[in-house]
Image (cartoon, grey):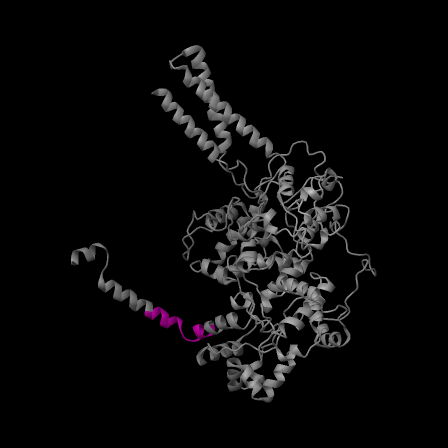
């Protein structure tokens, strides 16, 4: 027994020592710092949605100096359940309620007395952030020395370990080559862009205090020294100049083409000159199969010319339709609100995003990095340049109004299961054959939809039983000039 | 014997070919075009960039001191006073017909239900699922029961507190219809 224990390195005395050390370590850390930390955490989690500390009124009043204005016991009671206090007629509570547009503050009955007290402590002791002194030049954004860039690159790729721990290389989350799947973490390129932007991230600050829960979790074990961050900053600055390596896929089709071309050549050579294989059927089978493969490739490739089926480009913000339309159950038309009366379905303006994101500042998957882009665009007035995915040639007319409003076609009919797409892609090839097929098969709602009430002859035929349904084709959906004029 | 083997190999190869529908291009690649002579618009498309403009927007705002045709500027600001004034002055121009209320319900389901909930009690999915932290206002509270249609119209148009303005997303008629739906359906069917 003992032998196995010592073999696996499991020594009781070692464990006891480790436990003791941990306890000592924690005792050393608790006290003032951790109480203040807990208060800060609770404050950020529960209060910052409506209140600011030293930043003026948000939804609720400014909290700086609130501990001087109000008595501590009163604050405790108010935080616990303000509604009760107002109803019981506490004069100060009623006054506060009326001063703030009569918006009730949420009750925090789930917090213990100690927790509320730690929040109040945090508010009481809060001071505007002191300028942290860095060992390096934190304002430097360009003109790094070559050795600094190289050192940063090695740190970024994990070739040199960080001094204070952190095992995984930066590059394994912040991809340096374009990714073919959705990576919620900002790529190296985005980090670099944000770093170079004067209003963008302050890499020194965000490395020492992660901005969101997502980042907090991901960065928990990283405690980079100022010098290390400086090197990484140097690398990011350089990275923008040579840019992102494009993603490459294995050319399956090209390989097939070459393999069969070689096989066919060999078969031909053997058939005419070398004659190693005696059964000529084999040669013919190979050549026929090769021709079939080549023909198939040619047809498929030719058909996909000018059609961008499956096109799913990287957008300026990692906006996920799956999160918004799927998980959040937001109606398509909430954001694309002009789809039912306009040619274009409409790209939502910043205001539409901000209806929710004024309050929701941190995403479940991407933290604050992506949502912050909306706020930056709003501040700078520079529009977000979304990339258009569904393009029709100039000689085709298509109107969303006709299809969504008059035809009552569901969005998913043409755009596919958008509510399951993290990266929006073009589901259908938008070819003329695809349009025509749908116009041939789709039955028009002639009974209830008043839009079609002017088709008198068709209505007569329908009521006399001559025809049992009306397709888009019957009302001129296949006429050339309907779409081409 | 050999020919059978080769036959099966070709069958496998063909099967592989049809199975391998994956494209050689990455998702960021649009592929090739074949004589796109008439495919690209010479005129600037909606949302496209226009290099002739200083800000490169193809879509322009109306010239200063003008408004678009049929557009009625909304005069009431997003303040408690503006709300009171709008509620007192604005009168619903539409009649509460079943069609109008049905349309109101349709629009309510698109624009309001996420926060204010199916019953209008402020328990929308975004709040109950914990995705939106602030409790949305109940539309069937005592305070709202006492308010006229114009009040709801104003809050939709200009917003209130954390709720943003939805006037640019919903046309005026539809806003009135939503107000009617709230007044005539949600508030009347509330169990008290």
Is A410 positioned to the left or the right of B75 in the image?
left
Give the extent of the magenta segment: A23-36
Q: Quadrant of residue A352?
A: bottom right
Judged from this view, the residue extending furthest toward the front is: A464
Q: From what the image shows, is residue A247 above or below residue A402?
A: above
Query: In which quadrant of the rendered image does the C terminus of chain A lie?
Result: top right
Q: Quadrant of residue B90?
A: bottom right
Q: From what the image shows, is residue A166 above or below residue B81?
A: above
Q: Position of residue A170 (x, y in %)?
A: 47, 51
Whether residue B48 is visible: no
Q: Position of residue A301 (x, y in %)?
A: 57, 32
Residue A65 is one of the magenta-drawn residues: no
Judged from this view, the residue extending furthest toward the right is: B65
Name the magenta segment's main secondary structure: helix
Front position in the image: A147 or A335: A335
Is B131 positioned to the left or the right of A159 in the image?
right
Front position in the image: B115 or A192: B115
Q: Which residue is rendered at x = 27% and y = 66% of the image?
A: A17
Q: From what the image shows, is residue A56 above or below residue A372?
A: below
Q: Which residue is rendered at x = 36% and y = 70% of the image?
A: A26
Is A179 positioned to the left or the right of A338 in the image?
left
Residue A35 is one of the magenta-drawn residues: yes
Q: Position of residue A9 (x, y in %)?
A: 24, 56
Q: Which residue is rendered at x = 50% and y = 25% of the image?
A: A292
Query: In which quadrant of the rendered image does the N terminus of chain A lie?
Result: bottom left
Whether residue B97 is visible: yes
Q: Position of residue B87 (x, y in %)?
A: 73, 75
Front position in the image: A10 or B165: B165
């Amino acid at each position: 027994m003992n032998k196995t224990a010592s073999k696996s390195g499991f020594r009781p005395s070692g464990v006891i020592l480790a436990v003791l050390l941990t306890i000592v370590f924690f005792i050393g850390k608790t006290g003032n710092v951790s109480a203040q930390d807990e208060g800060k955490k609770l404050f950020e989690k529960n209060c910052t949605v409506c209140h600011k500390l030293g930043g003026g009124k948000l939804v609720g009043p400014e909290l700086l100096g609130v501990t001087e204005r109000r008595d501590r016991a009163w604050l405790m009671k108010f935080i616990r359940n303000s509604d009760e206090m107002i109803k019981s007629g506490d004069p100060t509570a009623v006054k506060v309620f009326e001063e703030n547009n009569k918006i009730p503050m949420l009750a925090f009955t789930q917090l213990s007395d100690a927790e509320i007290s730690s929040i109040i402590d945090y508010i009481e002791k809060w001071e505007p952030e002191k300028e942290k002194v860095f060992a390096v030049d934190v304002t430097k954004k360009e003109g790094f020395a070559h050795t600094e860039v190289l050192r940063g690159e090695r740190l970024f790729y994990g070739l040199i370990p960080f001094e204070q721990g952190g095992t995984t290389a930066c590059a394994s989350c912040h991809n340096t080559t374009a990714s073919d799947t959705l990576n919620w973490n900002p790529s190296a390129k985005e980090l670099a862009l944000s770093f170079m932007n004067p209003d963008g991230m302050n890499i020194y600050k965000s490395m020492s205090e992660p901005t969101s829960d997502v980042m907090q979790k991901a960065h928990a074990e990283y405690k980079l020294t100022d010098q290390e961050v400086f090197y990484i900053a140097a690398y990011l600055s350089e990275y923008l100049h040579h840019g992102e390596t494009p993603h490459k896929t294995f050319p399956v089709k090209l390989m097939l083409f070459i393999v069969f071309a070689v096989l066919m050549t060999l078969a031909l050579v053997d058939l005419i000159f070398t004659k190693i294989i005696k059964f000529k059927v084999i040669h013919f089978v190979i050549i026929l199969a090769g021709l079939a493969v080549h023909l198939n490739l040619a047809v498929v490739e030719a058909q996909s010319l000018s059609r961008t089926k499956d096109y799913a480009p990287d957008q300026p913000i990692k906006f996920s339709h799956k999160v918004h339309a799927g998980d959040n159950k937001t109606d398509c038309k909430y954001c694309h609100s002009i789809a039912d009366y306009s040619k274009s379905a409409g790209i939502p303006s910043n205001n539409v995003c901000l209806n929710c994101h004024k309050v929701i500042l941190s995403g479940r998957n991407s933290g604050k990095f992506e949502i912050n882009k909306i706020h930056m665009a709003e501040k700078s007035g520079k529009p977000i340049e979304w990339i258009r995915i569904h393009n029709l040639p100039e000689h085709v007319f298509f109107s969303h109004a006709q299809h969504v409003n008059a035809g009552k076609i569901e969005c998913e009919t043409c755009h596919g299961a958008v509510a399951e797409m993290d990266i929006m892609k073009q589901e259908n090839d938008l070819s003329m054959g695809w349009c025509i097929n749908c116009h041939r098969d789709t039955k028009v709602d002639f009974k209830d939809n008043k839009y079609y009430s002017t088709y008198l002859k068709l209505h007569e035929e329908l009521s006399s039983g001559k025809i049992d349904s009306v397709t888009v084709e019957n009302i001129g959906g296949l006429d050339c000039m309907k779409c081409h004029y | 014997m050999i020919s059978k083997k080769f036959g099966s190999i070709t069958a496998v190869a063909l099967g592989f070919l049809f199975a391998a529908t994956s494209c050689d291009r990455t998702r960021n690649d649009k592929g090739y075009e074949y004589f796109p002579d008439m495919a690209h618009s010479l005129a600037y498309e909606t949302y496209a960039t226009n290099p002739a403009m200083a800000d490169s927007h193809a879509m322009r705002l109306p010239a200063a001191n003008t408004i678009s045709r049929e557009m009625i500027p909304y005069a009431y600001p997003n303040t408690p006073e503006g709300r009171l004034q709008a509620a007192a002055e604005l009168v619903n121009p539409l009649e509460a017909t079943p069609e109008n209320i049905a349309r109101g319900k349709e629009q309510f389901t698109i624009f309001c239900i996420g926060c204010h909930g199916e019953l209008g009690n402020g328990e929308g999915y975004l709040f109950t699922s914990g995705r939106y932290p602030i409790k949305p206002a109940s539309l069937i509270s005592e305070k709202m029961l006492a308010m006229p249609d114009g009040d709801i119209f104003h809050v939709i148009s200009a917003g209130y507190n954390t709720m943003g303005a939805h006037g640019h997303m919903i046309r005026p008629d539809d806003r009135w219809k939503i107000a009617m739906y709230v007044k005539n359906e949600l508030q009347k069917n509330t169990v008290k």
